[in-house]
Image (cartoon, coloured by chain):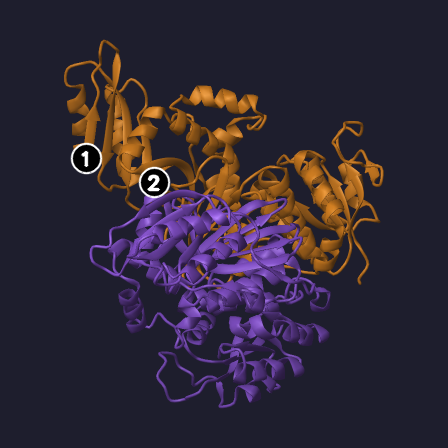
Chain colours: A orange, B purple
Amino acid sequence: MSPPLRLGIAGLGTVGVGVLKIVQAQSEVLAARAGRPIIVRAVSARTKSRDRGVDLSGFEWENDPVALAKRKDIDLFVELIGGEDGPAKAAVQAALAAGKNVVTANKAMLAIHGQELAQAAEKKGLSLRFEAAVAGGIPVIKALSEGLAGNAITRIMGVMNGTCNYILTRMETEGIDYETVFADAQALGYLESDPNLDVGGIDAAHKLALLSAIAFGTKVKFQGVELEGIQRITVTDIEQARDMGYRIKLLGVAQMTGRGLEQRMQPALVPADSPLGQLEGATNMVVVEGDSVGQIVLRGAGAGEGPTASAVVGDVIDIARGFNLPVFGQPADTLLDVQAAKASAPAAFYLRLALKDAPGAMAKITRALADAAVSIDRMRQYGHAGAAAAPVLIVTHKTTRSTLDYALDVIGDSGVSVEPPVAIRIEDV
Amino acid sequence: MSPPLRLGIAGLGTVGVGVLKIVQAQSEVLAARAGRPIIVRAVSARTKSRDRGVDLSGFEWENDPVALAKRKDIDLFVELIGGEDGPAKAAVQAALAAGKNVVTANKAMLAIHGQELAQAAEKKGLSLRFEAAVAGGIPVIKALSEGLAGNAITRIMGVMNGTCNYILTRMETEGIDYETVFADAQALGYLESDPNLDVGGIDAAHKLALLSAIAFGTKVKFQGVELEGIQRITVTDIEQARDMGYRIKLLGVAQMTGRGLEQRMQPALVPADSPLGQLEGATNMVVVEGDSVGQIVLRGAGAGEGPTASAVVGDVIDIARGFNLPVFGQPADTLLDVQAAKASAPAAFYLRLALKDAPGAMAKITRALADAAVSIDRMRQYGHAGAAAAPVLIVTHKTTRSTLDYALDVIGDSGVSVEPPVAIRIEDV
C-alpha cells in the first residue's frame, strides 16, 4: 500500500469536527477505498481549549492556519475556516504556493476568488476541490464536472439554501409570518451570523455561480447573479401560490444564451408536483439538464456536520487516489469571460401590490399593465376594510421581466401602491 | 495538450451510435475537459452495411470484436455488445490482456463475471468502468464509489428498470391490465428480446448486485438477490395500494446485516408521497443512505441513446484524465465473500388471495394467519357473484417474511385459494 496521505485541517467547527470523526471512525474503509491510509497530522483553530467532543491530542497544533498550510509533514490542506478573504484565503494561497493540494468548503472565497485560486493551483498541477461548498452532501460538483462531462449542459436549477427552504416550508405548513419564523431560525442557530447571506440569497448565489462555471466553461461570475432574497414573501403569497398548484422556493437558475450567461437566485413559483416543488424543510435539490442525458435530479441534505464532512472526505479520497482535474472541470485559462445577461425568456409572473384606497387606483394599475402589453391571466382584489391599503394579487400571462419591470415602474411612479410591488416568476421546471 | 485517447467501440446499437454522436459533436468540449482529444479509431458490429444514421467512413472496421479489442492503435475498448458471455466477455478479456482500459454498459456480464474481470483489470492496473450499466444517465456508480466514499453505506434502494415502471404507471393511470400494457410495451420495442429480463426483474437485479458490491465492499452476488417480477401485479393491487396512500414499484433494496447481505428486487408498496412513490414512467431513481451523508436521492433517465451514451462518455473522460480506481471501489481481492441473507426486518404486507366459494374457506385463511401470529390490520372480501373464486385483500401488521411465508404455505396446502397468494411488502422508504 502507498504511504499515507497526511492532512492538515484548519477550522474545527461543525464540519471540521465531522471530518475528524469520519477519518478516525472509518480509517480501514477509507484506506481500502483510497489505496492508502488517510491520517490527520495537524490541525488549527481559533481556540485550542474548547471542548469539541473529539480528542485532539494525537494531532500537532498550529495557531496560525498559514503556518499549518506550509508544514512539510502535510500533503493536503483542508480549509474549513470560511469567509471570502482573511485567513482562509491566505492559508489556501500559502498551501498552493507550498505545493499542497487543497480541499475547501468555502463557497464565498471561491465565488469571489475562484479564478485566481484555480490558476494558482493549476500552474503547479495541484488539486483544489470544493464538493462541500455546494449543496452539502450531494455530490453535484462531481456529477457535473465528471459524470456528466460528456454533455453540453443546457440549464441548472437548484434549491441550495436549506435555511430559506426551512423558513418557507414553516410559513406554509403553520401559516406563520416571515418575521416569526426568521426569529425562530435565528434562535435555533440555523442562520449565518450575517443572516442576509441566507435570506438575502447570497450564500445560494455563491453556490450557483460555482456550478455555472463548471457547467458552461465560464469564469465564475458571482456579480452577474440577479439576486433577490425571501424577505418580502408573505403567507398570502404562499397561499395564493398553493391555490394555483405552486409552491414558492428560493430558486437558482443558470443558463447560457446568445446574449450571455443568465444566472438568477430569486423566489420563484414552481409546480407543486415537480421534484423541486415537493422539496420540504432544509433539504437541497439540484437539477442538471444536459443535451444527451436529459434531466438529472439530485437531492439530499445541504448542510450539517455529517453531510458536509462526507463531501470533504470524498474530495480527500479522490486526491488520495491521485485524481487530478482542473478546478472548474477545464483549465482555468480556457474558461470564457462571458457577459452576464438578464433573464430574457418570457414567463408568467405573480404580482402582489398594496393598493391605496383611492378612486381610480385600480384603473391605474390595469392601465399601466395594458400600456406595457402585459396581459392579465387572473386577478384578485381584497376589500380595504378601513385599512389604508389592500392587497391586489395578479397573475400575468407570459411576458419578459424587462417588460414587466417597465409596467411596475409606472405603477410605482403613480403612487397607487403604498409599497413596492412584489413580482415572482412562475418557473417551468 | 496530451496525445489523443483512441477508442475502439464494439457494438453499434442505440448506445454505440449515441457515443459516436457525442464524440463527434462535442469534440472540442471533450478535449478541453479531458485535457486531450478523444477520437474513435475503429468500430465493430455484426453488420457493416446497416444504415445507422452516422457516417462510419472515418473509422477502421473490424468484423470481430476480439480483434478490435487487441488493436495496437486503440487505447480504450468500449464494449456495447451486451450479453453475459459470448463475444462481449471474450472481447473484454482480450482487451484487458492486451493492456487496454475498458468501458462497458454490460450489467449482465459484470453481475455474473464481475469479480473475475475486476481481478484481471486490477492485476494490470487497468480501468474497467461501467457507469452506463446501472440506471442509464444517472451517475450513481461515481456517486457511490467516489463522492460518497467517506460513508459507511447503510442501505441502497432503487427503481432501475424503466420498462417495469412504465408498465405499472400505465396500469395505474389507464386502469388497463398487465397483459395489455405488456403487449403494447413489446410492440413499442421497450422490452428486451427476452422480456423476462425486464418484467422478471433480472435486469434490475443485475444492477442492484453491482451497486451492492460497491456499497458494501462485497463480491458481486447476483445469485443472492431475492427476485420477483411484476407479472402477477393486477390493476386491483394497484388500486388497493392507491387507496391506502401507496404505489407499487419494482423496488430494489440492499443492506448489510449481521446475518449477511440482504438484496431483494421485488414489487413493493412505497408511500405515494415519497420520492420513490412519485416516480412516473420510465424514469429511474436510486436512493443511497450513508452514515454521514444521510439520504441522497438520484433521479434521471434510466435508458435510451442519449442518457446511456452520456454515462459511457463520462467514463471515457475519466480514463482520458488518467483517473484509475478499483473496479468496485476497493481492490477486488479485498472484497468480502459474504453470505446472502433473506430479508429479516419485519414489515407490513399486502396480500391478495383468490378465495374458493366454499363454506369455511375464509375461516381457514384467518386461522392460518392467526396460528402463525400474523395479525390483520385490515381486510376486504369481494362477493363471488357466481365465480369460482373471489378476491380477498388483506393488509397485515408488521411481521417477518418467513413468518408470513409459513402462513401462506398453510393456506396454499388448505386448497382454499385457487391460485397462489400474492404478497407484496410495504416498504418504509
Image mark 1: chain: A
Tell me the residue at 52%/67% (across/down). Answer: B206
**Which mark is drawn over residue A376?**
1
Mark before the other along the chain sequence, 1 or 2: 2
Q: Residue flagged by tag 1: what amino acid is it?
A: Ile
Residue A293 visible in the shown view: no
Q: Is residue B344 left or right of residue B168?
A: right
* Mark 1 Cα shell of 10 Å, populated few (<14), some (14-19), many (≥20): some
Tell me the residue at 46%/34% (across/down). Answer: A165
Q: Quadrant of the N terminus of chain A?
A: bottom right
The quarter of the displayed image where residue B243 is located: top left
Image mark 2: chain: A
Tell me the residue at 57%/83% (across/down). Answer: B91
- Residue B138, relative to residue A276: is it above or below? below
**Which mark is drawn over residue B289?**
none
Residue ID for mark 2: A272
The quarter of the displayed image where residue B414 is located: bottom left
Q: Are marks 1 and 2 on the same chain?
A: yes
Q: Is residue A425 left or right of residue B131?
A: left
* Mark 2 Cα shell of 10 Å, populated few (<14), some (14-19), many (≥20): some
Residue A85 in the image: state x and y as whole percent: 64, 35
| Secondary structure under the numbered disc 2 in the rendered image | loop
| Secondary structure under the numbered disc 1 in the rendered image | strand
> Farthest residue toward the front?
B359
Q: CA distance from mark 1 to mark 2?
A: 22 Å
Q: Residue flagged by tag 2: what amino acid is it?
A: Ala
Tell me the residue at 63%/34% (across/down). Answer: A83
